[in-house]
Image (spheres, grey):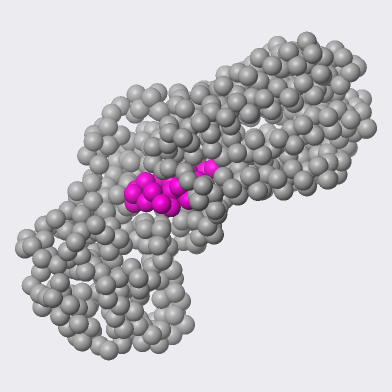
Amino acid sequence: METENQYLGKEKVSKLLFKFSIPCILALLITSLYNIVDQIFIGHGTTEGLGAVGNAATTIVFPLTLVAVALSGMFGDGTAAFLSICQGRKDTKSAHRAVGGSIAITFFISIIVVVLGLIFCDQILNLAGATADNIVYARQYYYIIVSFFPIYMLGNMLNSVIRADGAPAFAMIATVAGAVTNIILDPIFIFVLNWGIKGAAWATITGQIITLILSLIYLTRTKTFRLQFASLKPERPVLTNIAKLGVSTLITQLSIVVISMVCSKTLATFGAQSEYGANDPLAIIGICMKVFTIVISIAMGIIIGAQPILGYNIGAGNLNRVRETFRKCITAAIVAGLVATFFFEVCPEPIINIFGSNSSNPELYMQFATLTFRIFLMLVTFTCVIKVISIFFQAVGEPLRAAVVSLSRDIVFFVPLVLILPRLTNNITSVLWAAPIADVFGIVVAGGLAIAYFRHLGRPAETTTKANFQDSKPGVIITISREHGSQGKKIGELVAKQLGIPYYYKELTALAAKESGLEKTYIDKVNSNDGEEIMKELYLTTSPAKYAIEAQEQVLKDIAEKGSCVIVGRAADYVLRDNPNVLRIFIHAPLEYRVHNIMKMYDDDEKSATKNIKRSDKNRADYYSMISGQKWGNPANYDLCINAAMGKEKAADLIVNLATKK
């Protein structure tokens, strides 16, 4: 922790951002190539099925590929987060089962998507805005792309796993190799072999095959886990945790699916009623969205690279460095957005020409394309800032705020505007105005939440309780886990007093703060009862929580090295599992007994006391599961389970008697 403190907490922020953000930007830009090169070559084609009609066809198919990205991303990012947790607790068994199970379930789901996609091909294409002019070519592209979803989804899922295994460079190499293959083969398949739009699809698939092959090769040389054939058997508890951890990725990607389909369908409907026709607007919006992705990739790369900087400094209470990092990320995103806006507004034609047109009416095509770039991307700078704020909230352990910022612009504002505006005006250009209007509303929400957050951040931090390691002697180390209201803390105090050894409870947080340089506030938050289940689990995977958990675990090990003591809570029985002197105790009691105790202690009514107990026990169980991968309260994990209803003195005597015999 000290090395990280000196590095992330003291190195110049600009230097850290340059080191961490540039690779992230490059990785995201390379990934974007998959979605761009096909449209460039298709747009320059002059044969049947290419040009604007071909680009319209690929735009229609694009939303379903995002469904594949969403599903594979959920298990890829979920597994990556779970792997990070497993690495922290040195749990190689759960790690290899998580990866193997995710491979199996991703493949199984991909087959289902392929079957459903092929059966309902025309219904899906029509829903996405297909017309009589382009549906034939959309089918050609669609059938090939969808049929190879298992390869695409497995490659995408494994890429996240490889990064989490500590090999981001290899993950990028696998992606670059696929993208370069796609770029090389596109002109060969489309023009030399004269395969047309099918050639573009086959070039994409070949690139995806290369990425998957390299990813599979990596699985033979992993760092933190080793796959076995048995690893491929899915385990429900592990996959459930993975799905929960990856749900934010699923929601984010599916929101893009909704945006793409609603936008494409509306443009096709109102385009058919306009002088532009249905195909040209579809082709143009597809191009516009791909260019938009490039700009957003730069903004996202900046803030993703800043995540470890923000994570450590928010946990360490270096609030000025948090503000400085945020300001620099926002400034860089604004610069990127303004530069892009300049080109979109002043000279969009050269950008549009990169993708060709070959429209039946080139003049109208360029007219609508220019309008699209100038209106639709008018406030792309706001979009960049919104994305930066959303990912910033993830980095500082605020997943709920991150979700609100992410979904407000896209789902709450953009989608309704796309549906309403053209129907009010009966004008296709109204669709384009939905984006800048949504950007205005979105920046108000994101900016408001950011301002409120920093105002709160500016308040005086809670004073850290003074604590020191207590002198001890060699002997038994007693860890006490307890149900809320069972008087486990009181029992622990009695045991420590009878044995004449140190007692640690609240002191653990203060010691962790003191030894790690982190703020007590952030260590406390890890152990709090606040938050819904999924949001709590998402929080526990963020950088501040990870630093806090690592600090607590190190302090527990330091305490154990100093000799005999009593430790209450913090999954100490698991953290110290390799120490031969540990005596693991679990204290439970009937609900009625615990409710009575809570009512007496906090002056609660029965209903409030019961709710408080259930919430607290659920929080302890979730924390224990996150740290250990095991079930909290399982008798097999403890040396002694005691029903505290016998009385705290008798319970303490039992523990003392057992401890003296150990």
Please tell me whether residue 395 belongs to the stretch shown in magenta.
no
Question: With respect to residue 495, does 571 lie above or below?
Answer: above
Which residue is more in the foreground, 293 or 444?
293
Q: Mostly what secondary structure, the magenta segment?
A: helix
Query: Would you say 126 lies left or right of 646 here?
Result: right
Question: With respect to residue 330, does 70 lie above or below?
Answer: below
Query: Would you say 601 lies left or right of 81 here?
Result: left
Which residue is more in the foreground, 423 or 573?
573
The structure residue drawn at horizontal position 54% and vertical position 28%, both measured from the top left corner, is: 214
Give residue 506's quadrant in the image: bottom left
Give x and y (percent) for residue 650.
Answer: 20, 87
Q: Is residue 63 visible?
A: no
Give x and y (percent) for residue 12.
Answer: 30, 27
Please tell me whether residue 91 belongs to the stretch shown in magenta.
yes
Residue bounds of the magenta highlight: 75-99
Give x and y (percent) for residue 587.
Answer: 30, 77
Give x and y (percent) for residue 338.
Answer: 57, 22
The structure residue drawn at horizontal position 38% and vertical position 71%, both measured from the top left corner, is: 634
Query: Would you say 500 lies left or right of 43 here?
Result: left
Question: With respect to residue 14, does 112 lie above or below?
Answer: below
The structure residue drawn at horizontal position 27% and vertical position 37%, both measured from the top left corner, is: 4
